[in-house]
Amino acid sequence: MTTNPTSKQDLILNAFITLLIQGGYQSATINKTAEVAGVNPSTIFRKFTDKEGLLSAVVERHLHDLSTIFDGMVVIGDVEKDLMTMSQTYQEFQANHQEIVLVGVQESFRMPEMSRAVEEIPLQFKQMLREYFTDMRAQHKISDQVDIEAATMNMIWLNFGYFLAAIRFENPDLVTPPEDFYDKQIRFFAKSLSV
Amino acid sequence: MTTNPTSKQDLILNAFITLLIQGGYQSATINKTAEVAGVNPSTIFRKFTDKEGLLSAVVERHLHDLSTIFDGMVVIGDVEKDLMTMSQTYQEFQANHQEIVLVGVQESFRMPEMSRAVEEIPLQFKQMLREYFTDMRAQHKISDQVDIEAATMNMIWLNFGYFLAAIRFENPDLVTPPEDFYDKQIRFFAKSLSV
DNA sequence: TCTGCATGCAAGTGCTTGCTTGCATTTATG
DNA sequence: CATAAATGCAAGCAAGCACTTGCATGCAGA
């Protein structure tokens, strides 16, 4: 093999993820996954043992990605711009891991471990935000009056809500393009930090 | 019948809704529904024809409730308090119709009509908020500078995000009690309206 | 050229699902 | 009390599911 085709492992995983996004865990059947991946169903079992094994592989890949979530991000000390950067990083990560968020929301009852893997995303975001706000307050770049915990949670829920609306709703009255979100919403939010 | 027991229709519907909340549409099987309702599976088919028919009944009930969503609500002209009231009304309605929101989020690909029924909730909320903000600005109770559209969407996504986090996450770092949400978050939000 | 590994293929197993049907039994109603 | 409607019950059906297995095939490296 001289070319560089995606490995069958990845082909299968990607097919599975596609189906997870479209219909959740239950409707992402092995047969469909095999068909989308262009692979025989038996191959999937040989590689992943189980349907659960397939899911585990997805979760593992996700947790690995998560550990590097804010790695490339640079803050410059301009609150408005930094918040935009952080929000964008968070949004893009979630968008690239929709399947985890969706399955986590869907199966939180039957697969609590899954739910906990999903929670890790906003938790990382929260930790970073809190540190940032604390820092900015020490530098007097945001008001002393600001309730950091409240501001942090506000950002988290706002971003989480926008994300889910964006991937599941179609009505333009409920979803704006990401750039508008960063530009208008984060700016709106940033204002309340100077009061 | 001299007592007033819930009709079998309602028993079945409620059982179905319970299962929808716990595991979504696919895992809410007719057999389980019958068992939870204390009813024979065949009865369900005689009453609702189909599994789809069951879902339709749930959606119909929902749409009926939705038409009265803000009926009992009273605004007093105090922005902070009014926003709390509105947020609470919205949150409580969503909590009482979790099943619709969840199934809508889960099955938006396969059942777009469902998705549209879910969208109606935030759309109603949006309409009310926009009117309220416009009104308050005319009365100079909020700043002229405020971007009403941005403020409206901010409230919607914030509330939507908090709601989904609240029903699916367990970590107290990601979910606060509703009272805290109204008290701290809405107050935080209200501040940005006076800038 | 030989060997071993990865894959395809097809048949099959046992379980669950949605859904139907015919008949007995209970329950409400006049 | 009589009649009709609402339910329970049990058997059954076709389809889809996860998963297994045995064998043929093809491809890679020694």
Image (tube, coloured by chain):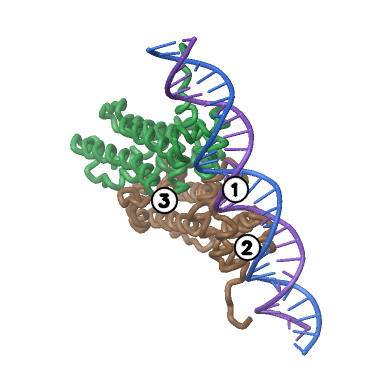
Chain colours: A green, B brown, C purple, D blue
In primary-sequence order, the first of circles 2 and 1 is 2
- In what element is the residue under mark 1? helix
Residue located at (39% from left, 46% from top): A115
Q: Is residue A103 above or below residue B35?
A: above
- In what element is the residue under mark 3? helix
**Residue A46 pos. (x, y %):** 47, 33
Give me the disc on residue B41.
Answer: 2
Q: Is residue A54 above or below residue B92?
A: above
Host chain of mark 1: B
Q: The C terminus of chain A lies in which quarter of the figure?
A: top left
**Residue A158 pos. (x, y %):** 40, 43
Q: Which residue is mark 3?
A: B168
**Residue A164 pos. (x, y %):** 47, 41
- Total residue callouts: 3
Q: Which residue is mark 1?
A: B114
- How far is the residue under mark 2 from the one under mark 1? 25 Å
Q: Amino acid at mark 2?
A: Pro
Residue located at (57% from left, 36% from top): A32
Q: Nearer the viewer, mark 1 or mark 3?
A: 3
Label 2 and label 3 in one chain: yes
Q: Is residue A32 above or below residue B133?
A: above
Q: Amino acid at mark 1?
A: Met
In this orientation, does residue B83 appear? Answer: yes
